[in-house]
């Protein structure tokens, strides 16, 4: 994660953009996930120009976070994909522990972990969402996080359909 974030912020590794079927890519990431039975999807067919490896990493990180902070007995994590005339919008939503409102603005910072995630047994270094934010920004997009304690978290990613 550290190496990838350095590549994205320093310009050492430009994006390898190509035409992607984003809905197919999302299904591939779900199918390859060891907890795929805990993931529901609602996808529309959508294509865009993007770096497949980095979008795949973005999707895996978001799904891993959502599953990690949701109890195994909770409702499945849901990933949805929709399109506006100019943007691809996908959302990963869980019914997990949630994040306090005062923590949300710092979640995309490197090495930042909210109080609820700082326990030694939860692992991680606070780089996953930082890397996700960098991937979104490198594609000309953005990432927004909404959460409520006890109700869960939603991460909304918006990427441009036209990169011209």
Image (cartoon, rainbow, N blue to C red):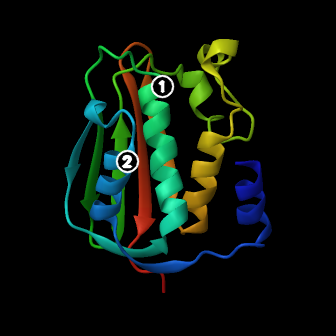
Q: Nearer the viewer, residue 59 or 94?
A: 59
156 lies above or below 13? above
The numbered dot on residue 57 is: none
- On the image, the x and y values in percent for residue 124 come to 66, 29
Q: How many marks?
A: 2
Q: Residue at x 71, y 73 (%)?
A: 13
Give me the residue at 76% from left, 72% from top. Answer: 11
Q: Residue 141, can we see it?
A: no
Residue appearing at x 59%, y 51% in the figure: 133
Q: Find residue 16 and report its image quarter.
A: bottom right
- The secondary structure type at the circle numbered 1 is helix
Crowding near the residue tagged with mark 2, few <14, some 14–19, many ≥20 C-alpha atoms within 10 Å: few
Front: mark 1 or 2:
2
Q: Which numbered marker is on residue 68?
A: 1
- Above or below, comparing residue 47 to residue 104 in the picture: below
Count neighbours of disc 1 (C-alpha within 10 A) and say few if under 14, some if 14 to 19, many if 20 or more: few
**Mark 1–mark 2 distance (CA, rounded to whole Å):** 16 Å
In the figure, is residue 107 to the left or right of 49?
right
Q: Residue furthest bottom?
A: 164
Question: Residue beneath label 2, please?
Answer: 32
Q: Is residue 102 visible?
A: yes
Residue 86: x and y in percent read 34, 73
């Amino acid at each position: 994660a550290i190496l990838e974030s350095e590549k994205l912020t320093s310009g050492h590794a430009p994006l390898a953009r190509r035409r992607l079927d984003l809905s197919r890519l999302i299904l591939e990431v779900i199918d390859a996930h060891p907890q795929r039975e805990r993931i529901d999807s609602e996808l529309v067919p959508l294509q865009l120009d993007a770096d497949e490896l980095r979008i795949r990493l973005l999707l895996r990180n978001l799904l891993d976070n959502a599953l990690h902070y949701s109890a195994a007995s909770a409702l499945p994590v849901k990933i949805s994909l929709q399109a506006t005339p100019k943007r691809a919008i996908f959302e990963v939503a869980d019914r997990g522990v949630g994040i306090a409102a005062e923590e949300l603005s710092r979640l995309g910072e490197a090495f930042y972990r909210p109080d609820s995630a700082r326990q030694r047994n939860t692992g991680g270094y606070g780089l996953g969402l930082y890397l996700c934010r960098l991937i979104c920004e490198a594609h000309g997009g953005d990432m927004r996080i909404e959460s409520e304690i006890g109700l869960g978290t939603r991460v909304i990613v918006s990427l441009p359909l036209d990169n011209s």
